[in-house]
Amino acid sequence: MRIRWREVSGHFDESVEGRLPDGLVHGTTGADPALLLLRYQALGWRVEQDGRPMDADGLRPTEDGEPPTLVVHPDATVSVNLFLWPGDEIAFDVDAREIHDQATFDVVCRFLVETGRALATDVDLCTEGTTSPFLRYSARTDSLGLCP
């Protein structure tokens, strides 16, 4: 089932300052960032760390010892900030200014699905600053759907 832009456009209201819908990848482990990187590269998506394309060496530690943040470009118009937090948590956000029609929303949907499939886990997208998802990829049903 394809989710229509008109059903979710309010969650990407770029007129609201700081509107960065937040995402969470459930039940991740320490090995998952490398698996995601491999999946994204296999899909031909550009992945950057510190403004530089990822290379064969993979993830680089940051200068201040913080977990790395990656920028994933599933296409030329949409970028996703991927946060690799301590405790094996993977979170992300999308810039609402980049999501403005069905085509760009479909890119976000594909990101959720490919991320969930790569790790066989659920992936949520929530309104910024909340933990209540409006969109979820379910690994159990291999489907993307709206949340009540």
Image: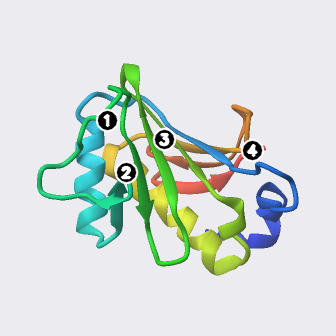
The amino acid type found where label 1 is placed reads: Thr
Of labels 3 and 1, earlier in sequence is 1
Residue visible at 47% across and 33% down in the picture: 26
Compute the Cα span from label 3 to label 1. Answer: 28 Å
Judging from the image, what secondary structure is the residue with disc 1 in? loop
Residue visible at 69% across and 50% down in the picture: 20
* Residue contact at pointers 2 and 4, CB within 8 angstroms: no
Identify the residue position indicated by label 3 in the image: 122
* Residue contact at pointers 1 and 2, CB within 8 angstroms: yes
Compute the Cα span from label 3 to label 2. Answer: 27 Å
Compute the Cα span from label 1 to label 2. Answer: 9 Å
The amino acid type found where label 3 is placed reads: Asp
Of labels 4 and 1, earlier in sequence is 1
Identify the residue position indicated by label 4 in the image: 127
Identify the residue position indicated by label 1 in the image: 62
Which residue is situated farthest in the front direction here? 63
The amino acid type found where label 4 is placed reads: Thr
